[in-house]
Amino acid sequence: MSQRDPLRLPTRDPFTGGDVVVTRLETASGVAIEGRFSLGWVGRLTPQQLDFVGLLLERRNNLQKLAADLGIAYNTARSRFEEIVTAMGAPPDDGSVAPPASAPSPAGAAAARRREILRRVAAGELDVDAAHDELRGPTG
């Protein structure tokens, strides 16, 4: 192999869009390694997305600085970043913050409390008047 500049890494099959499997690696010293190598998460991104990730890392993950340096709106940079995150397999960000799975929402906790009170009435552990008082909650 000649000592010319390397080509850009193709991350997708240019004909089918499918995965690329690397079968030969060569070091600068000329040592060749052959086998079947996956590109891992890199293979899920386009060359342009890889460039964007590289620039973002150079700017220490400062998306606002990257947008300014590229002369694009912050929202455009954010959109490109979200496309990359989604391409890597994460669900799209809808901007909301979900509560931890172990912590029920306030509405879910209230519904669970009502179900428990009704279960106690059905089991004969609680009379209707007491259940009504519990459902109304503390007064004051």
Image (spheres, rainbow, N blue to C red):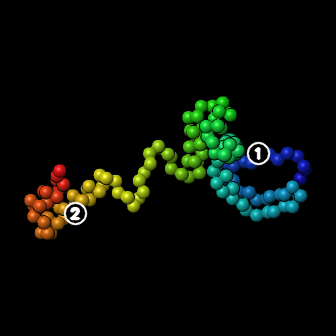
Q: Nearer the viewer, residue 105 or 89?
A: 105
Left or right, 50 with reference to 81: right
Kindly identify the residue that appears in the image at 89 percent across and 58 percent down: 29
Residue 48 vs 24, above or below: the answer is above
Asked whether residue 17 is in view, the answer is no
Which of the two labelled residues, at mark 1 and mark 2, occupies the earlier sequence position? 1
Which residue is located at x 37 percent, y 58 percent? 103
Q: Residue 123, percent across and down?
A: 15, 69
Amino acid at dot 2: Glu
Q: How many marks?
A: 2
Image side of residue 95 versus residue 123, left or right: right
Q: Can you see residue 55?
A: yes
Residue 58 or residue 35, whichever sits in front? 58
> How crowded is the residue under tag 2: few (<14 C-alpha within 10 Å), some, or many (20+)?
few
Q: x%, y% of residue 140?
A: 17, 50
Q: Which mark, residue 37?
A: none
Q: Which residue is mark 2?
A: 116
Distance between the alpha carbons at the discs numbered 1 and 2: 62 Å
Residue that numbered label 1 is attached to: 8
Q: Residue 91 location, x and y as percent? A: 50, 50
Query: Residue 4, image x and y in percent?
Result: 88, 46
Label 1, residues with CA under 10 Å away: few <14, some 14-19, many ≥20: few
Report the amino acid beneath label 1: Arg
Q: Nearer the viewer, residue 49 or 37?
A: 49
Q: Is residue 126 above or below residue 80?
A: below
